[in-house]
Image: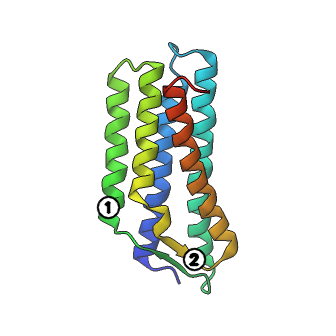
Amino acid sequence: MLSSKMDNLLVNLAKIERGISRIYEYLSKQEAFTPPVRRFWKAIMEEEEVHEKIFKDIRERARADDSFEIEIGTDLDELKAFVEKLNVLLLDIKKSNVSESEAYSFGATIEAEIDEANFLKRVKTKDPEMSKMLNRIDSGTQKHRVMMVNYLRGIS
């Protein structure tokens, strides 16, 4: 049985991914950006949506399967604060006339903060399939950060 606390933690982990995808969606629609840059942000947005779906799938599995065990070593307030931070960042980005370079900088900062927060490393399960899915999110986060830093530096 999935505890209320674990359920809320999984909901908020999914919200973090959704919040990131909303930021990237906004960037993908910037008319001032070149088509390849808009396509880049759209592709990254879609990957973040996959990350959100993974957390939702884990939640559904945990709710449906009493034998499924998951531990999340973070607290709800920390996750909610991160969700709020993403919402504020989205508002800030919408208020400014962000350049392509600034967008990559924003993205690299977001991905670095997610990585530094170690949310994913604090989610533990013995289920090999779910572990693989969590590793996919972690790898995607690392890849996104490296890509954005490289684009920011003019390396592609």
Residue 105, picture quadrant: top left
Say few, some or many: other residues with alpha carbon within 10 Å of mark 1 (under 14 / 14 to 19 / 20 or more): some
Q: Is residue 117 left or right of residue 34?
A: left
- In the picture, the quarter occupied by the C terminus is top right
Label 2 residue SS:
strand
Q: Amino acid at mark 2?
A: Thr
Q: Position of residue 99 (x, y in %)?
A: 43, 18
Residue 58 or residue 151, whichever sits in front: 151
Say few, some or many: other residues with alpha carbon within 10 Å of mark 2 (under 14 / 14 to 19 / 20 or more): some
Residue 16 or residue 99, whichever sits in front: 99
Label 1 residue SS:
helix
When the figure is inspected, residue 56 is found, relative to residue 84, above or below; the finding is below
When the figure is inspected, residue 74 is found, relative to residue 93, above or below; the finding is below
Give whichever of discs 1 and 2 has the lower sequence position: 1
Residue under numbered circle 2: 125
When the figure is inspected, residue 153 is found, relative to residue 125, above or below; the finding is above
The residue drawn where x is 29% and y is 63% is 77
Q: Position of residue 130 (x, y in %)?
A: 64, 69
When the figure is inspected, residue 94 is found, relative to residue 88, above or below; the finding is above
Q: Position of residue 132 (x, y in %)?
A: 67, 65
The residue drawn where x is 33% and y is 33% is 91
Number of numbered labels in the structure image:
2
Residue under numbered circle 1: 78
Q: Position of residue 32 (x, y in %)?
A: 50, 13
The residue drawn where x is 32% and y is 61% is 78
Q: Amino acid at mark 1?
A: Glu
For the residues labelled 1 and 2, the Cα–Cα distance comes to: 21 Å
The residue drawn where x is 47% and y is 43% is 20
Q: Is residue 18 left or right of residue 50?
A: left
